């Protein structure tokens, strides 16, 4: 699995720590920024990462900002993307198993590094469960297509 990762300046430190953690897990990733000292608009980073996921270049992605919310809202504007803010292990598990979320979003101002690592590990280890969630995710995709017409 190859992961895309991105942040704004409010969550640069968390992104760096999560990249180190991905290294220990042997998971390949591409860093979409921000770089140290950069001041960026989080929607630009979220759009770049979410678009790459939607295009199939990455199976999953991680986005970090101050709360995780802005990145999540922006990522979910990209057709075909399901992003979730997860600040606990249970939500991360359900985001994958029930909602098939390809992008996880964290807020550096909300959670600490060790908790973020634990949540990330759970999310990485989970797959979409299908079953009763399949028609629900299909309905999400249907709604997505309905409102994202070009």
Image (spheres, rainbow, N blue to C red):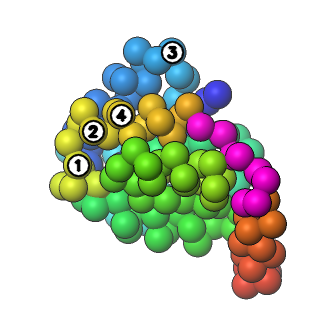
The residue beneath circle 2 is 115
Which x, y percent locates residue 119?
39, 40
Which x, y percent locates residue 30?
52, 33
How far, Cα to Cα, is label 1 from label 4? Answer: 11 Å
Q: Relative to 16, is 120 on the left or the right?
A: right
**Disc 2 and disc 1 in contact, CB within 8 angstroms:** yes
Location of residue 80 by image quarter: bottom right
**Disc 2 and disc 3 in contact, CB within 8 angstroms:** no
Residue under the image location 27 percent in, 39 percent down? 115
How far, Cα to Cα, is label 2 from label 3? Answer: 19 Å
Q: Return the disc, 1 or 4, that comes first in the chain's sequence.
A: 1
Select label 1 or label 3 by which is in front.
Answer: 1
The residue beneath circle 3 is 26
Q: Return the disc, 3 or 4, that comes first in the chain's sequence.
A: 3
Q: Residues within 10 Å of mark 4 (few under 14, many from 20)?
A: some
Disc marking residue 118: 4
As helix, strand or loop, the secondary structure at mark 4 comes to: helix
**Disc 2 and disc 4 in contact, CB within 8 angstroms:** yes
Which one is nearer the viewer's eye here, 50 or 131?
A: 131
Which one is nearer the viewer's eye here, 88 or 22?
A: 88
């Amino acid at each position: 699995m190859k992961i895309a990762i991105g942040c704004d300046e409010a969550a640069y430190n968390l992104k760096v720590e999560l990249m180190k953690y991905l290294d220990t897990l042997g998971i390949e990733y591409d860093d979409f920024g921000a770089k140290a000292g950069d001041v960026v608009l989080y929607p630009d980073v979220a759009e770049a990462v979410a678009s790459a996921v939607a295009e199939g270049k990455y199976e999953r992605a991680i986005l970090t900002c101050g709360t995780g919310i802005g990145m999540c809202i922006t990522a979910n504007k990209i057709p075909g993307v399901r992003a979730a803010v997860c600040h606990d292990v249970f939500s991360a598990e359900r985001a994958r198993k029930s909602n098939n979320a390809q992008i996880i979003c964290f807020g550096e101002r909300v959670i600490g590094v060790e908790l973020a690592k634990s949540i990330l590990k759970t999310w990485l280890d989970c797959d979409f469960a299908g079953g009763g969630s399949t028609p629900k995710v299909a309905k999400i995709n249907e709604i997505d297509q309905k409102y994202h017409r070009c």
